Amino acid sequence: MQQKSLTFITRQAPYGSNKAKLVIDAALAAAVFEQQVNFLFMDDGVFQLVQNQTAESISSKTIGRALETLELYGIEQALVDSVSLEERALSAEDLAIPVKILNVEQVRQLAARSDVVINL
């Protein structure tokens, strides 16, 4: 089976819908099948990365725990759009996991060199 480069872009806030969890699950499933997986957080998706979240008060699972498993599944880097961080007054120090911050051109290049882009 030929390895594909898949880029998953998550744009949704961590709670209020199941879209954030769906993107994580899809990326983990692709990684299990030994595909090259890029995981990019953009727009309100960067809020998924904020450290010290607790979702128990809204009867939900904390999404940060799922993000901590990315590396275990072979997704070596979480990627973050620099503009999205800046617009939300966040920095790498605010985030629960290590990330690589990409500028606008790097995001464009990532999408261009990916075989498949899943944007949710």
Image (tube, rainbow, N blue to C red):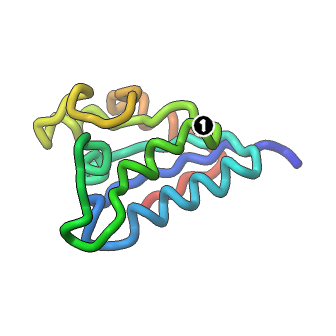
Q: Is residue 116 above or below residue 15?
A: above
Q: Quadrant of residue 36?
A: top right
Residue closest to the eye, 37 or 105:
37
Give the residue at x 46% y 42%.
68
Amino acid bearing label 1: Arg
Give the residue at x 57% y 53%.
27
Q: Residue furthest front?
A: 56
Residue closest to the eye, 91 or 83:
91
In the rendered image, residue 101, in percent from the top left (x then y), is placed at: 35, 27
Q: Secondary structure at mark 1?
A: helix
Q: Is residue 61 above or below residue 110?
A: below
Q: How many marks?
A: 1
Disc 1 marks which residue? 113
Q: Quadrant of residue 50?
A: top left
Location of the C terminus (image quadrant): bottom left
In the rendered image, residue 55, in percent from the top left (x then y), is placed at: 25, 62
Q: Residues within 10 Å of mark 1 (few under 14, many from 20)?
A: few
User: In the picture provided, is 59 more to the left or to the right than 79?
Assistant: left
Give the residue at x 43% y 63%.
21
In the rendered image, residue 80, in percent from the top left (x then y), is placed at: 36, 36
Q: Residue furthest left?
A: 89
In the rendered image, residue 61, in percent from the top left (x then y), is placed at: 36, 64
Q: Is residue 116 above or below residue 96?
A: below
